[in-house]
Amino acid sequence: MKKTESEKIKLENSYTQLPEVFYTLQDPTPVTSPEFVIFNAVLAQELGLDAKLIQSEEGAAILAGNQVPDHATPLAQAYAGHQFGHFTMLGDGRAILLGEHITPDDNRRDIQLKGAGRTPYSRGGDGRAALGPMLREYIISEAMHALGVPTTRSLAVVSTGEPTYRETELPGAILTRVAASHLRVGTFQYARKWGTQEDLRALADYAIKRHYPEVWNQENRYVSFLRELIKKQAVLIAKWQLVGFIHGVMNTDNMTISGETIDYGPCAFMDVYSPETVFSSIDVQGRYAYQNQPYIAGWNLARFAEAILPLLDKDQDRAIEIANKEVTSFLDLYNQNWLAGMRGKLGIFNEETEDEKLVEQLLEIMEKEKADYTNTFRGLTFPDRQKDEVFQTDEFANWKEKWEARLQRQDESMEDIHYLMRESNPAVIPRNHKVEEALEAAVAGDNSVMNRLLDVLKNPYAHTNAQEEYGRPPATPDPAYRTYCGT
């Protein structure tokens, strides 16, 4: 593999300070003719990278894995995970971590190439990725960021000039993913199953120093680590629910230690409000349905607590007691965050005990009337948009009276209320039919549809005229719409 002294990307790799059981040094597999399909110049600027230089021929070679930046130490991470409840050995089967870029504000960000070739963890896979799924991750992850949801980011998608074979022949591509780190619950499960207790401790100390340095000097840093991770995941899952996002593969290897959303395979946003909504083609039993996401997050966190039990206390019974206490706090924390977000969506500033019932009554009406999730809240924000059938029912009229009475029991002005609702209710989400249109055009060589969609999604709370078209649900809803892992 050719090394480059390029100044385009300067990398470190602190992950190599961990015991070697956690990774395998692995260069990306070169591709035939890399070319940029899309590049995130805004993210590049935020990272302190020279966007113009990276978008050169040499930059494409770096982000395709044909050249390795100076000081990079490419590797594939080992981890495990419960996939749909079944525990298995996993690892980066098609992803190569080039290293970590240090941003101008001294933050460390992983630079990973997804689709960069086979690794020791590929388990029979080809290590490659198709263009459509990589562009899908780019679109959804950037939309999530704009919506205010913690997430990994997408710096670029580079075509490989080579076919990728799935059910059919597809154009190949590599996604450059940026993350606070790629540490997962599954990384700790792997350490507990296949590492020593010192390996587990080394991993926990690394994660704490990287993501939770404030707990380092606390009496039991590992208990505090567990507690802070639970808090972050409570915030994250609440934000998912508030924007109608359905992840689709909430396996333990897809829950990050940083609290970022990761892995945009069979994910989608809900149009019609239905708690049972599932989009993933492989989730045939609805394990990861919209309504189950908070409970699955709690289940995943219980698996994390199990993995670090030896660090919580030397006495196993005491360690289990500590773990149970912390994990059982998750649903309450999640509900607090979710209800706070719902108050914002309804323009409510203060707290009353009946607020949750008010929210639940609205959701029950929306489910019964098959109302659009995003546009119902938008209609509440802008009364002149209340043209959907849900707003014409007697049940809604009765609920509206209670809501308006609730708004009167606070000191804020209607102007303040309206502003809060505007900032809490997006005008646009990445509607599934719009995403599919963009991907179909892009795979065929026309990026204009995708670029227009991305431009509209940049500021979902702007409520501009340009967003009108993208805020409409499909003319003919597809109840059988399914998304795929893209492997």
Image: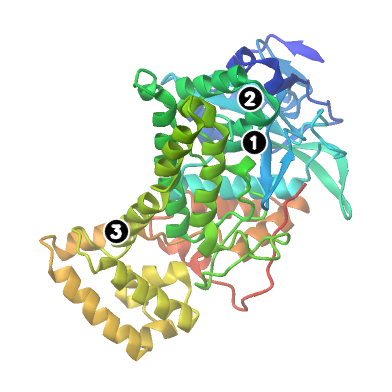
| Residue 332 visible within the image | yes
CB within 8 Å, label 1 to label 2: yes
Q: Would you name the residue on which mark 3 appears?
A: 344
Q: Quadrant of residue 349?
A: bottom left
Residue 23 percent location from the top left of the image: 71, 22
Identified by mark 2, the residue type is Ile
User: x, y (%) of residue 343?
Assistant: 28, 61
Q: Is residue 11 above or below residue 224?
A: above
Q: CA distance from mark 3 to mark 2?
A: 40 Å
**Residue drawn 60% across and 31% down?**
188
Residue 20 at what x, y percent from top left? 70, 16
> Which residue lies at the image location 30% right of the left edge and 71% below the top edge?
357
Callout 2: SS: helix
Nearest to the eye among marks 3 and 2: give it: 3
- Name the residue nearer the viewer: 334 or 397: 334
- The residue identified by callout 2 is 54
